[in-house]
Amino acid sequence: MPINDVEAVLARLMPPAISQASQTGIEAMLDELAAARPELAAVKAEISRTRWYLLSGIAATIIAATTALVLLQPAQRQQSSASKIAAPAWVLVSESNRFQAMTDEGWRDQTNGSAMRAVRLQMVGENLLKDVETGMIVKVSEPREEIVFMPISAF
Amino acid sequence: MNSPATEWKQWLAEHGPRLLLFARGWSQNRADAEDLVQDAILRMWHFQADKAAQVPDLPLVFSTIRFCGLNHHRSESRRRKREGSIIYLNDFQDVWLDPLLEEDDEAVAMREAVQNLSQKLREVVVMKFWGELTFLQISETLAISPNTAASRYRYALEQLAHELRRVKEDRRHAN
């Protein structure tokens, strides 16, 4: 029997639904979990707001810097060097890295013939930025993945 | 914008049956499989909390069910050793898959053949066929290469084809 025929028979089978009791139980659990952390409902909106604030902040900084350069150019020579430094719109308050998962990727051969153990790291970099004008603090999370090669000692 | 709980419920309504089917491979009966799905969803909720409680990716949930199943299997083995004298009866109505049509003997035979596949092969078939995962996603879930996942799928289908041929021949001899 060809494999396509087997797949055709498999298509005539379907997994049964989760029982009503179990479905109700899981839904009640989800409601309880959501109620225990009401801030989660606001997180999605906050993420889009954060992105918007960041983009607005960057755009505002560029426009302000360009305007300042154009307008203040004639008087620039007379000003002291200290006054030339414009206050930044956003200040980095804190910076952190958090590991989420680590996966062993096995051994890898290097070009010089030595073996290295590869470890895939999934981490999230979190920066807290403060808007100098409004005092608003924005958290920026950046998930990233890295592969670290570790030398394997001879045995 | 829907609340996270509402989104998760919609996600569960869509994917619940395929998760349950996968969980069947790691449990003794339907009720245990449903507990396994619930356990996995609870873990996924906490895992996704840092990601604005977005609904999880299906391969990750399969992986979590597998992890929960392994844990459950270990504790279950210990419990069974303690309760060695108890006889567990099979529930013959407790099936993994339902035929779409009534009296579809071929589909029923196929269902039994799927259930009788080895765990390694069955997982791949369930994830590929009913879970609709790619071989790459399956390979990530099972920590194997995509080629191995594809080979297991093909080997499983060959076994199912063989089993189906055998059932048909038996039926022909009986008639």
Image (tube, coloured by chain):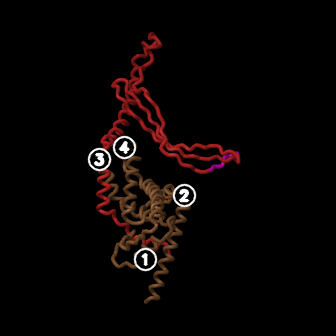
Chain colours: A red, B brown
Structural distance between the alpha carbons of marks 1 and 2: 30 Å
Structural distance between the alpha carbons of marks 1 and 3: 43 Å
Residue visible at 45% across and 68% down? B85
Residue visible at 45% across and 61% down? B79
Q: Which is nearer the N-term, disc 1 or disc 3? A: 3
Q: Looking at the picture, how far across and down is residue B37, in whole percent?
A: 38, 58
Q: Are marks 4 and 2 in contact (CB under 8 Å)?
A: no
Residue carrying label 2: B144
Residue type at mark 4?
A: Ala
- Determine if residue B59 is in view: no
Residue carrying label 3: B3
Q: Looking at the picture, how far across and down is residue B48, in whole percent?
A: 39, 47
Image: A31 above or below B163: above
Q: Which is nearer the N-term, disc 1 or disc 4? A: 4
Q: Is residue B59 highlighted in magenta?
A: no
Q: Any mark on residue B109, and which?
A: 1
Residue type at mark 3?
A: Ser
Structural distance between the alpha carbons of marks 4 and 2: 30 Å
Q: Chain of mark 1?
A: B
Residue carrying label 4: B52
Instruction: Give the magenta range.
Output: A107-112
Residue type at mark 2?
A: Ile
Residue A19: image quadrant is bottom left
Structural distance between the alpha carbons of marks 4 and 3: 11 Å
Name the element at disc 3.
loop
Image: B54 above or below B159: above
